[in-house]
Amino acid sequence: MNFSHWQGRHRFASFVLSMAFFCLAPAVGAATTNAAPKLASADCLDCHLDPANKRIVNGHAVAMALFPTNGFAKSVHNALDCIDCHDGVKEMQHDKNLPPPNCGSCHEKELKDYATSIHGMSHSMGASGAAQCWDCHGSHEILGVKDPASSVYKLNLPQTCAKCHSNTNLTKEYQIEFPEAASQYMDSIHGRALLKMGLIVAPSCNDCHGAHKIKRSVDRDSPINHANVAKTCGKCHVGIEETYNKSIHGQLLAKGDARGPVCIDCHSAHQIVNPTGNSFKATSDARCGKCHADRLEHYSETYHGKAIALGKANSAPDVAACYDCHGFHDVLPAADPNSHLSTNNILVTCQKCHPSATTKFTQYRPHANPLDQKNYPLLHIVFLAMTGLLIGTFSFFGIHTIAWAVRSIYLYTHDSKTFREAKFEAQAGDEWFTRFVPFERFLHFLVVTSFLLLVITGMPLKFYYTDWAKVLFSFIGGPDTARMLHRFGAVITFFYFTLHLTSLVGKAWKGRKSVRNPETGKFEWKRVFNVLGGPDSMIPTLQDWHDFRAHNKWFFGKGPKPSFDRWTYWEKFDYFAVFWGVAIIGFSGLIMWFPEFFTRFLPGWAINIALILHSDEALLAAGFIFSIHFFNTHFRIEKFPMDTVIFSGRVSKTEMLHERKRWYDRLVATGKLDDYRVRDEWFRWKNIAKSFGYFAFILGLLLLGLIIYAMLSRLVH
């Protein structure tokens, strides 16, 4: 039946009914004067199917809504009359302020449930924007719940709920707690399974929140109340719920302890992701830390914690998070025989990531607190020792450096012309002598490159909590690439250190005759001490103490500026600092590099000690090199902007007389000065060497600034 034909029939029926009522009215009499006639659907459609009919709204004529005849014919209500739902309509002519449709005349139970829901209660309190029956089910075109075209069909329900829960104006007006819930659900593992893969068994909104009886999470009978969440999730995840109920978390919940975490505390409510994916691991530790902040704090200082903070979990799943050791849903106290960390199971747990781990390896303490003297006494002693070393070294040499800088600035400001001329003559002299042979310069090149590589790839781990650490690791290529480069830098370090030790052995072998009496040929300890403590030796002597005292007197104007021999006392300190650093940083680094091997004969807590030694000694080395060493070598006014001697290997006669006159006088006295006179050509590759030097110099200063910023930000927070 077409629209015009239907419209004509309803008008004719209306006319016939009106005439009949007019003719029969006198006969009916008083019995019918008080009875209102029941409106037929045809009466309603006379107006609501005529596009020409208007009604006045706010002083303006507005077309009346056209009734969806085709949609209504397909709906579940197609056998009902209009006033079966719109029972508030009593006469043909009615104003706009009509009561809403009465769904409860047929759906009494659903209406009672709705009245107690968050939507119904909001309406009763005057929140007119809260969802009503037709907001979810539709109005005249309501289809069955199992009809794929229905707005409440399982595949369509998320979009239906999102009409309100993605409406930013509505979420702000009613201060909805989770305004992003709809979009988060659609990106979750549940949403993708339902909406993208069409898996009808995947949960939709009503599976967790209910249909008509949706309540707030604080309501005790709400399916999303804290005490009921596990049961709600258990409707689908039956086996996991059983496992959870036996865990320490489930046992707490069963006792009514609100501290017992439930599914949404770990997996979230709407942003549930695949737990086997890297994104879940990246955030899992922070979620555990909401309840176990004290454990997370010290876990974060381990390699695992730092690597996760720097994004390793997003690139590789092999870094251990909390659940890798404690379990997933079956978390139990370590004293429980069924726990993953019980004495019976802990080795198997460790071997999941460390296949060659032994029983001693399990003694590693991932939550050790170095400030806890009672539970970790040895770790506490090591921490105090390294902290004391850091503070003592920087305090001593910091005062030394400041005093030197102040004295230099004072002399420069009082006689800047003479100072500039002396500096120019020292750098542009016509007589040059060798300080460093090519082999020594090559070793220094290896020292510079490996040290910068180690700092760039290591310091972000120490200061993992800063934004620059994350940016730097991202630029490098992630924690895995940084780890590989860091170990490459360690190999270079061991290589140059081995070369240097080999050269020392070679020199000792060549000079073996100098420790024997030339007349008797017998070995004499006195000659050994003369060689070891000679002016060309790097071993500190009493003369270095005298030089140190004289230098400090000059700082404060209490004596003349001292002259030095081939090596100064601060250069000898730098030299032996490398021995100390390679020994401490190198050995502790090897323990962390090969923990399974070293814990075959060392207890697992040796890894904890190695971490403190490696981290603090590396900080000491980086901070000292980029500040104290840079000042002694480059920052001094007479050396600024850079001393190129380590690249050229040469020093001018003017500079020797100015700074190392004792060395010059000794060479002249022994007739060896010409042996040190430079014969090679430096100027051909000077620009290349200086460019490399400036690059390393600027990079070191930048790293120093980042380290200082990281330490200050840690103190502030």
Image (cartoon, rainbow, N blue to C red):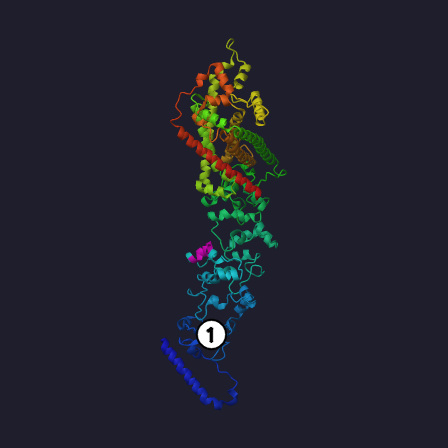
Which residue is more in the foreground, 120 or 244? 120
Please state if 369 lies on the left or on the right of 699 as rendered: right
Name the one closer to the observer, 285 or 11. Answer: 11
Residue at 48% in and 68% down? 134
Horizontal and vertical percent position of residue 576: 53, 26
The magenta stretch spans residue 545: no
- The quarter of the picture where residue 678 lies is top left
Magenta stretch in the rendered image: 186-195
Horizontal side of 642 relative to 603 (left or right) equals left
Residue type, mark 1 in image: Gly
Instruction: Please identify the dominant SS of the magenta region.
Output: helix
Q: Is residue 674 visible?
A: yes
Pick whichever, 555 or 51, lies toward us.
555
Q: Quadrant of the C terminus?
A: top right
187 drawn magenta: yes
Residue at left 60%, top 36%?
Answer: 380
Q: Residue at x 55, y 48 (%)?
A: 288
Find disc 1 in the rendering and name its residue: 59
Between 681 and 429, which is closer to the camera in this rendering? 429
